[in-house]
Image (spheres, grey):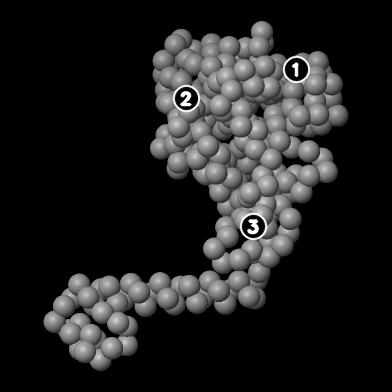
Amino acid sequence: MVIGDPDSIAGLDKNPASTNQLGKIWYMDIGSYLNGFIGIIYPRPCAACGNILYRQEKVLCIRCVLDLPKTGFHADPDNEVAQIFWGRVRVEHATSYMYFYDQSRYRRILHEIKYKGWQQLGIEMGRMFGEELLPTPFGQVDLIHPVPLHPAKQKARGFNQSELIAEGMAEILQKPVETSLISRISDSGTQTHKTRYERWQNVEGIFRVVKEDMLRDRHVLLVDDVITTGATLEACASAVLLIEGTRVSIATLAYVKRYL
């Protein structure tokens, strides 16, 4: 059927399925037009370089997607992130999606999610991360749990950036996301200017499992936005591993390589 052909249109009265098809095509065409019109008035920037996105691009331009500084850690069981936890806490698998550098344009991604509230960006980055992890052992976990914020901090911010990433990952991995099985019972404040030892002291005992039955004998994937020394994730994993039969794997969106 050719849209606009009189014979085809005349036949639509006798074919409800064709009528529905035409309606869908018309709806999609209008939707595409409106999206394009909105894009002209409110152009969407690439989350990394800031250039205006084309209609088929989502949150990153194609150039930035191709140049994304991926770690590839999911393919190496003894990767740098996994080594952070050696001798500290029993972690099954650990990985990060991309490297984080102060002078990199990709630094903007974390900033836009965490401080500018670009929530869809967090979800989309989680989907991209999930695509990498799907064919690996990370795809075999039982559930995904973002590292919780202290309730006061989450209320002030309005969202948990790690939860957004976990939500996107869950869509691809087809695993449930739980957000209430672990709680943060104290606010450790910023870790930015603390030494490795000070970070460890600052987060010791700040997490508590509140629904033990839902974690018992489960393999939990803990998700966070960025890993530096791993102190926060170590504290969270340690709380989970107190529950009988639990296993823990760790995945973060970014890895700060400069910390030794």
In front: mark 1 or mark 3?
3
Q: In the image, what residue occupies the spot 18% across and 76% down?
A: 16
Labels 1 & 3 near each other (Cβ < 8 A): no
Q: Which residue is mark 3?
A: 61
Note whether residue 227 is visible. Answer: yes
For the N terminus, which image quadrant?
bottom left
Secondary structure state at the residue bearing disc 1: helix
State the SS at label 3: loop
Q: CA distance from mark 3 to mark 2?
A: 30 Å
In terms of sequence position, does the residue under pointer 1 or pointer 3 come before the other? Answer: 3
- Residue 3 falls in which quadrant of the image? bottom left
Q: Which residue is mark 1?
A: 200
Instruction: State the mark number for residue 141.
Output: none
Neighbor class of circle 2 (other Cα within 10 Å; few <14, some 14-19, many 20+) is some
Q: Residue at x 25, y 73 (%)?
A: 20
Where residue 188 appears, as percent x and y from the top left, is 74, 27
Would residue 114 be seen by someone viewing this image from the given angle? no
Q: Quadrant of the C terminus?
A: top right
- Marks 1 and 2, how far apart in space? 28 Å
Characterize the local packing of mark 1: few (<14), some (14-19) or many (20 or more) Cα atoms within 10 angstroms.
some
How many numbered marks, from 0 up? 3
- Looking at the picture, does residue 13 appear above or below residue 202? below
Q: Which comes before the other along the chain, label 1 or label 2?
A: 2
Instruction: Report how far apart the C-alphas of labels 1 and 3 lie in the structure.
Output: 38 Å
- Determine the secondary structure under disc 2: helix
Q: Is residue 167 left or right of residue 162?
A: left
Task: Quickly name the residue at label 2.
Answer: 137
Q: Residue at horizontal 52%, vertical 44%? A: 127
